[in-house]
Image: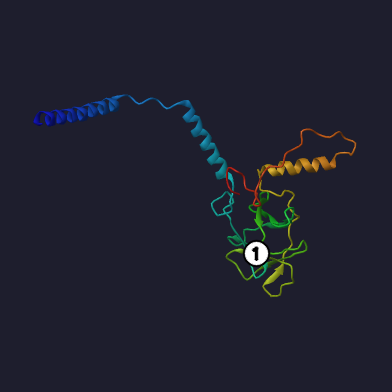
Amino acid sequence: MTIFVRLRQFLLLSSFLAGLFLLSQAAAQPQAPKSGASDAQKRQAKEKETEEDKYDRLDGKGASGKTVDVIEFAGNFEIHVYPGGSTQGLSVKVDRRNKDKPVAVIAYRFNNQAPLVRRAILSIPLSDGFLSYRDTSVTEYDKFIFSNNELAGKELVKYKLDPPPKQLYPEGHPANDVQAAAVRDEREPANSPPKTPEVEQPTVDENGSLKSFSW
């Protein structure tokens, strides 16, 4: 029995030493260079990150440097823009194509640049004839109130909105191209031949989100 025990111990020790030898040989092997496909994937990821970085989420970190809060309070729709005095112009219209989920389409004008269009789902009823106010009692941010009713208060002044935004989605969104194509089709003479193929409506959510990132 002693001989068999010693033989077993010898075999276990031999296996252990063989494993150590193989590990040392693997560690000594030169590393294979990274494949070109991996580098291409990294470049694509970098380009995607750059595209997302260009999109201004109006969180204070984008190119405009502005922060926007959209809230519903006391049955009214409010927009708060930080810092105060940032808003050069504002326009709002309601997208009612989905009757169950109307969306406020908001165009902000900052820094003498083209308007930035953003979308916000409405959970309160807001008629097309809504009234617009600015609350001048607040200075740390620009406070705008939109209501179906006349609001009273010496701090509230009626605010003249810019013309309604022509596009329904944020800049760069594919649905804007579809909308523009539909407008062109409507302007064509009735006797013009039909175009093929038809432009397919992209799949988007109510906030106008792209698959690559959130608006």
Q: Position of residue 185 (x, y in %)?
A: 82, 40
Asked whether 81 or 16 is in front, the reply is 16
- Quadrant position of residue 158: bottom right
Give how far across and how far down residue 171 sits, in percent: 66, 46
Q: Residue at x 47, y 30 (%)?
A: 38
Closer-to-camera residue (31/26): 26
Q: Nearer the viewer, residue 161 or 184?
A: 184
Q: Is residue 78 above or below residue 7?
A: below
* Quarter holding residue 210: top right
Count of picture labels? 1
Question: Residue 123 appears at what percent x and percent y?
Answer: 66, 62
Farthest residue, direction front: 1
Query: What color scheme is it?
Result: rainbow
Q: Residue furthest bottom?
A: 153
Q: Secondary structure at mark 1?
A: strand
For badge 1, the amino acid type reads Glu
Q: Residue at x 71, y 50 (%)?
A: 168
Q: In the picture provided, is 96 more to the left or to the right than 28?
A: right
| Horizontal and vertical percent position of residue 213 | 57, 45
Outermost residue toward the right in this view: 191
Q: Is residue 179 left or right of residue 17?
A: right
Query: Who's the residue at 81% across and 34% down the image?
Result: 195
Q: Which residue is mark 1?
A: 78
Residue at 20% across, 28% down: 17
Label 1: few (<14), some or many (≥20) within 10 Å? some
Which of these two is toward me, 18 or 181? 18
Q: Is residue 207 rendered to the left or right of residue 95?
A: left
Quadrant where the N terminus sits is: top left
